[in-house]
Image (cartoon, grey):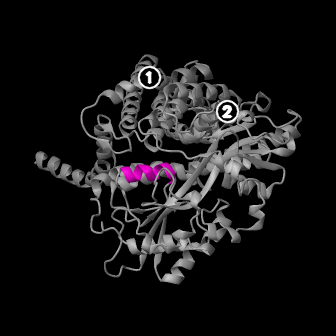
Amino acid sequence: MRERVAKGWSAGLAALLAPVTLWLGLFFLIPLLIILVYSFGTSGIYGGITLGFNPGNYLKVFDPLYLEIIVRSFGIAALTTLICFLLGYPLAYFIVFKGRRWRNALILLVMVPFWTSLLIRAYAWVVILGGNGIANKTLQFLGITDGPVNLIFTPEAVLMGMTYSYLPFMVLPLYAALEKFDVRLKEAGKDLGASRWQTFVRVTFPLSLPGVIAGSILVFIPSAGEFVIPDLLGGSQTVMTGNLIQNQFLQSRDWAFGSALSVLLAVLLLGAIMFYVRRIGSDKLEGV
Amino acid sequence: MKRISRGRFLRTMGAAGVAGSTLSVLACQPNTSAQSGGGGGGPEEKALNFYNWADYVAESTVPDFEKQTGIKVTQDFFSSNEDLLAKLQAGGTGYDVIVPSDYMVAIMIKSDVVQKLDMAQIPNSKNVGKEYKGLSYDPNNEYSLPYQWGTTGILYNKKEIGQLPESWDPLWDTEFEGEMSMLNDTRETLGAALYKLGYSVNATDQGQLEEAKAELKKQNPLLRGYFDSTEARPLVQNGDLLLGHVFSGDAFLALSENEDLDYVIPKPAATRWTDNMCIPNGAEHPQNAHKFINYILDAEVGAELSNYTYYATPNEAALPMIDDALKKLPTYSPTQEQFERLQVIEDTGEVTREYERIFTEVKSS
């Protein structure tokens, strides 16, 4: 009897999962496999690819130039994640614990940027930070600067643009994690003589770690592969892995090397995330 | 290689396009039903698929053709030559007329993705000026006829810095540090360095390329950034930049809106590029495609086209109908001496990847 129930349940589950399996298979798994197969191919001079086993595409990655770009991309992504965390945590904390009846409205405001395309918003920064933009005009009006200063087309502008773009990906999981938090635990901490800071460090923060982990991953992954913002806000002087991959397909006509770079980026990201989850995961165990 | 809207928008969409065409390699079989050379055959369906750079036809061009011939034109847009090539290589695109740039025409002929034109169906080909015929990428114009052409040079603020010499040196002048930009285009920007050194834009010699790299590395810290022509134009126009490496169409647009600006074709050499009309292999409406190419090469149609895009026409018969305001702009009608210093970018085969690597290295230095 029990077996039949379990079976029926799994058939229903299979039916429910079929569409998403098909979707992911067709539009995620198969393209991923194509990239993997291509990464061992040999690019024709005029684009296109001859399939085979050519590990040379991976060896090319060890060119110091490309290694440096990959390392730099991960550095920028890590910095973006850190800044998003430092800005996002207080924001999520504030919305959950101090937002009161404004809570839903405030979290909606965090999501508002998603209503417009990332490209449009990135272009908006070009206008805001430009020589005659609002930022420069304001600085001059307040007497902080005499003439227009270079705010845009700098590495800092890239970092700012990425932080701006990915901040909601940090805030939303943090909000979800903190929202579930049982306020009585804070009261218990207080009753047991802990200061507010101690309560936060030993109770609230450890319990919100799943949100921190999810948020960090959601910010880190797209940041490491970013290619639009460095071009738009960095004047193309900050080359990231994403730009490198894009160029292999659209300029060099080297699909095989582009595919190898894509696979490598995916593997490195996976490795970084596993390392991160393990580290934070074990800290969490020690902390509680 | 370069149109009014080579914006990032389109470029990004182009990236998505390549991803899409990768899939379509599996999904589609190349269309072989209409591989014929174009001549003869029965009447065709009244349809034409035109694949062009964005914002690169006059508003009246397509509607007038439809009115004249009853052929319904479907327009689609690409953002880079490589994007266009990738789509054609994947097959089954259904495009009848495409507009590749010079070096890409050569690649397409070598890759056997375009078909020979039947000149008997294109009587207006006689309107093409001799300077625009028989260029190195298609020496006998068997596969292509020119659509528009232009140059790559320096747009600058004459009011602020005075008249510049016809030279590439100002783009390396420390006096303009932080107020200059180069094109975010591998061949053009490496080309500028090669021109400056007195080499060919199609250099394949490792030593010459190394020298060009050294020049560009010297220049990189002086630049505000590497921009598309369409991005650099407004920056020079509103005073954010003093000098910008741009395509002529953007320069002419800026010049006609702001009298303080000027445009030079530097010595000893600069790029002259041409976009061309071709018919892909497997086009379903080759007769209509020939009709359309013939229509574009009509004097009046050609003039309207260039008056709209601000690029130059290869159509000699159209020249008298080009707006006077345009003709008066510096270098819009280059002098013989200016014209002779122009070079055509050719495909560099395997060395293309070396160019790309150098540009990546320069940008990240």
Closer to the camera: disc 1 or disc 2? 1
Say if A164 sits above or below A5 in the image: above
Magenta residues, dominant SS class = helix
Residue at coordinates 45% horizontally, 58% vertically from top-left?
B140
Label 1 crowding class (10 Å Cα cut-off): few <14, some 14-19, many 20+? few
Residue at coordinates 70% horizontally, 48% vertically from top-left?
B337
The x, y position of residue A98, in whole percent, is 64, 39
Q: Mark 1 points at which residue?
A: A63
Label 2 marks a residue whose chain is A
> What amino acid type is highlighted by mark number 1?
Asp
The x, y position of residue B113, in whole percent, is 36, 56
Q: Mark 2 points at which residue?
A: A154
Residue A10 marker: none
- Horizontal side of A49 relative to B240 (left or right) equals left
Label 1 marks a residue whose chain is A
Label 2 crowding class (10 Å Cα cut-off): few <14, some 14-19, many 20+? some
Residue B157 magenta: no
Q: Earlier in the sequence, mark 1 or mark 2?
A: 1
Which stretch appears magenta?
A: B101-110
Judged from this view, the residue extending furthest toward the top is A286
The x, y position of residue A12, in whole percent, is 22, 54
Residue at coordinates 41% horizontally, 30% vertically from top-left?
A269
Q: Name the one closer to the observer, A83 or B353.
A: B353
- Horizontal side of B134 relative to A108 (left or right) equals left
- Are discs 1 and 2 less than 8 Å apart at CB? no
The x, y position of residue A50, in whole percent, is 28, 41
Q: Can residue B354 be seen in this view?
A: yes
Assign a secondary structure to mark 2: loop
Assign a secondary structure to mark 1: loop
